[in-house]
Image (cartoon, rainbow, N blue to C red):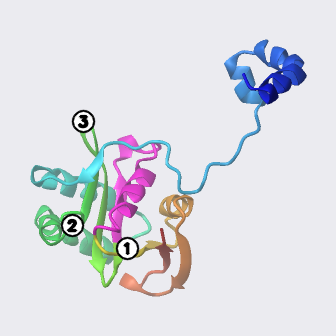
Amino acid sequence: MAAWQDDWFSKNAPAIAQIMLFSATEVDAALPKRPLPTRMFLTMPPIGPIAEHEMDALAALMRDTIQPLAYYNAPARRAELANYTARELASLVAVDPQAVLVARDGTGLTGFCVSRFDDGTIWLSWFGTAAVARGRGIGASLLAALAGTLPSRHAHKIWCDSRVDNTESRSVLERAGFQRIATLTNHWYGQDYFLWEWYP
């Protein structure tokens, strides 16, 4: 032990002895808490590009996600459902293998993230989580995985929209570090949207 270390331990022996009287839980509770960085995600379920045999399952999951959304009007729901059939999803992947990312567990698909390359940026079209798997951080993990695709796709940022009354997506986007840059009124399907962007 170096001389300075010996001196430090001698001076702090009472405090060290006091700490040793507490359990690990008590010490942890006593330590000051530092907030986690906005972009740190604590859980990362298995996430990766969709496989060909998963297209039908993803189309069903997206249909189950989109159909009950109260903040979309009927024309919006019809159009979005038509855009994300198994055939349309396969077409996206044929152009860009990282366009569709999915989260999986032992039962199948638990989440999805659909995007496309857009002139040096990535447009985030959709992300969502199966109803039975919500609250596990899967949405945040999907966004983190999407961010990881930027270098290989030669893109410098992600951008997207959300309905102004879609509080769930708004919360996840904000926690992931997305910045709201505009409000679009009477826009797609005659509805109001927030526009978001994220830079690495």
- For residue 181, the mark is none
Task: Residue at 40% x, 48% y: name it.
Answer: 138
- For residue 84, the mark is 2
Q: Secondary structure at mark 2?
A: loop
**Residue under pointer 3:** 107
Task: Residue at 84% x, 16% y: name it.
Answer: 18
Q: Earlier in the sequence, mark 2 or mark 1?
A: 1
Pair 2/1: label in front: 2
- Note whether 6 is above or below 82 in the view shown: above
Residue 80 x %, y %: 27, 71
Res. 81 visible in picture: yes
**Residue under pointer 1:** 73
Task: Residue at 52% x, 64% y: name it.
Answer: 170
Residue 63 x %, y %: 25, 58
> Which residue type carries mark 1?
Asn
Residue 166 x %, y %: 49, 65
Magenta region, residue range: 124-152
